[in-house]
Amino acid sequence: MMSLTVDEILRGTGPGPAQSVGQMSVIPLLGEDDDTFAPPVLEVSTTGYGSVHLRNDADRPTLVPPGAGWVVAHKAQDHALGGGALLRPGESRQIDTAMCIQQTQGGLIPSAKHDLLILPAALRAKALSVRHVQDFRKLWESIQAFNLGFGIVQQGGHLEAFVRAFQKELDTFVAEFEVVPRQVGAIILVGGEVAGVERAPSAAFWRAVWGPLIRVCYGSLAIHVARANKAPPATRSPLRVETMSLAGLRDALARARDAEREVVDTRVRALRVSLVSAADAADETLGSITLTTVGSPRLSGQVVTIDQAVRFASLCAAA
């Protein structure tokens, strides 16, 4: 079994200034574009429970992120994928190992470019572990337990119940964390600990996945941590003004930023040298492009390589 460090996964990127709000901090990863992949703006429909049909109408291949899902306004059974998928230019493809994420709702999703959702961090490891299992009910128990953790007592696997209950908070995360120029990824910390490592092949691809990532995937984790712990995380430093003047305030802000930067840098340095193990067999290949599942005691997810160089990564910590 091959192993790689997070540093190898992030090779070719560099950190930008951290953004912090509440329990969440985001370190942008900056880099150059690799335009091999089109952003994952796909036509999506369902042809049966557990069967998702995808169409890539771009003139380049694309990749569907692990944990991709579609919660639609129609009276139709919402669906998600456990792992990622590679699609050739113009390819239409049916995936029969998808999962229903709205247990008692009937109906099929009509074909359209529906908005992308990425599963909550707390569900991604489970969804990834059953990515090859052909059973549309396979995430229902996990969704029910997830909802109960937020005080949502509706029975069954209804992810839309969480999205509806916390819509305002989730939308706020999208507004609070901005994409910066040349951003192709991010390291996400929640409650002072690393919650995710995300890398895209290009800035355009990143803009397509960042909203779904910050809104439901990591936003759900930030809400959970904030409900359990009102104290600021270790990555947030209190403002201690020693002299009541504008100069004193500027000095206090500078000290707080320096202290926060040191704590974040310490977490990131430890992360970059940590190892993740790759599965013996690739999940999918497309010419020189390979999609592989990786994991460690802290993070699990998938990476995409081109001639063994990592161009995409989505690694998430289980809650």
Image (cartoon, grey):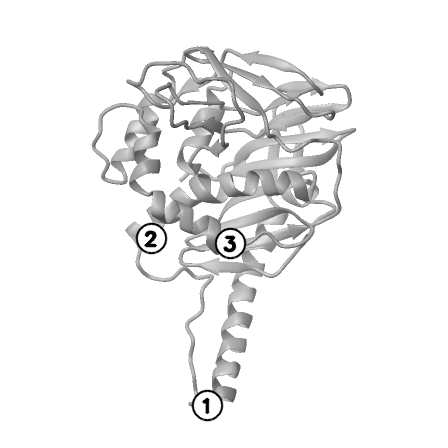
Q: Is residue 34 left or right of residue 95?
A: right
Q: Nearer the viewer, residue 255 or 98?
A: 98
Q: Secondary structure at mark 1?
A: loop
Residue 177 shows which numbered tag? 3
Whether pointer 1 and pointer 2 mark residues with C-beta atoms closer than 8 Å, the reply is no
Residue 245 shows which numbered tag? 1
Give the CA distance from mark 3 to mark 2: 17 Å
Q: Secondary structure at mark 2?
A: helix
**Mark 2 is on which residue type?**
Ala
Q: Badge 2 is on which residue?
A: 226
The residue lying at 72 percent from left, 49 percent from top is 31
Neighbourhood count class around disc 1 (C-alpha, 10 Å): few under 14, some 14–19, many 20 upward: few
Q: Nearer the viewer, residue 264 or 70?
A: 70
Indicate the position of residue 202 as horizontal and vertical percent values.
Answer: 70, 41
Residue 141 picture quarter: top left
Neighbourhood count class around disc 3 (C-alpha, 10 Å): few under 14, some 14–19, many 20 upward: many
Foreground disc of the pair 3, 2: 3
Indicate the position of residue 112 as horizontal and vertical percent values.
Answer: 52, 22
Whether pointer 3 and pointer 2 mark residues with C-beta atoms closer than 8 Å, the reply is no
Q: Is residue 177 visible?
A: yes
Indicate the position of residue 45 as horizontal and vertical percent values.
Answer: 49, 17
